[in-house]
Amino acid sequence: MNKTKITKTLMAVLVGSALVGGSAMAADTSTSSDSTGSKIDSSMNKVGGYMDDSGVTAKVKAALVDNDAIKSTDISVKTHHGVVTLSGFVPSQDQAEVAVAAAKKVEGVKSVSDKLHVKDSTKASVSGYAGDAATTSEIKAKLLADDIIPSRHVKVVTTNGVVELSGTVKTQAQSERAEGIAKAIDGVKSVKNDLTVK
């Protein structure tokens, strides 16, 4: 009888241990499955974001191809979190502006970053080159003389009277001031402000 009682007690302890251990493992598993579930959700969000961006890119490319006013096939389109970047070459500044406007109209586009460059379809003459070099020099001198703009961080390139400002400045006010200085120079047709505010 004693032997049977000990056996039953031992059986009860083992079953109890198994139940306690099993519930602990189940709790562990549910935490693990919750963690795995959130990882899957996170991955799906990333894939969804990528798919959204690639869809926006495709729609912008289609809009550019369908627009008769845009003559260039040298435009590259990239999208990141709804921000579309247009880069490449167009025959005129007007074409760049039309491309940006067309991209902004596409559903899903939050903003457009214009990195398009105007390509000279005719060979630049020596006088044209000299004029651009003089314009660039004058802008650089004005930026250097300005106390507000960190001129050593601003790159100036002039092509056929179109000035491109690139580099980094500390504030939006500095960016706008640099653009204003460039626009005030004789011979400047337009200014493309690619300055980054950091």
Image: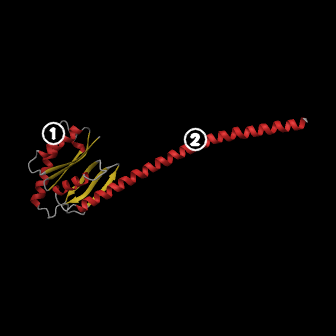
Residue at figure coordinates x 21%, y 60% from the top left: 67
How many residues crowd around disc 1 within 10 Å: few (fewer than 14), some, or many (20 or more)?
few
| In-front residue for pair 42/125 | 42
Drawn side of residue 51 relative to residue 30, left or right: left
| In-front residue for pair 37/116 | 37
Task: Name the residue type under label 1.
Answer: Ala
Q: Quadrant of residue 179?
A: top left
Task: Name the residue type under label 2.
Answer: Thr
Q: Position of residue 61 (x, y in %)?
A: 28, 59
Q: Quadrant of residue 24?
A: top right
Drawn side of residue 81 relative to residue 95, left or right: right
Task: Please report contact status of discs 2 and 1: CB closer than 8 Å, yes or no.
Answer: no
Residue at figure coordinates x 69%, y 40% from the top left: 21
The residue that disc 2 covers is 31
Measured in 3D between alpha carbons, the distance from the residue under mark 2 to the one under mark 1, in whole angstroms, is 63 Å
- Residue 145's label in the rendered image is 1
Q: Quadrant of the N terminus?
A: top right
* Vertical placement of residue 68 versus 3, above or below: below
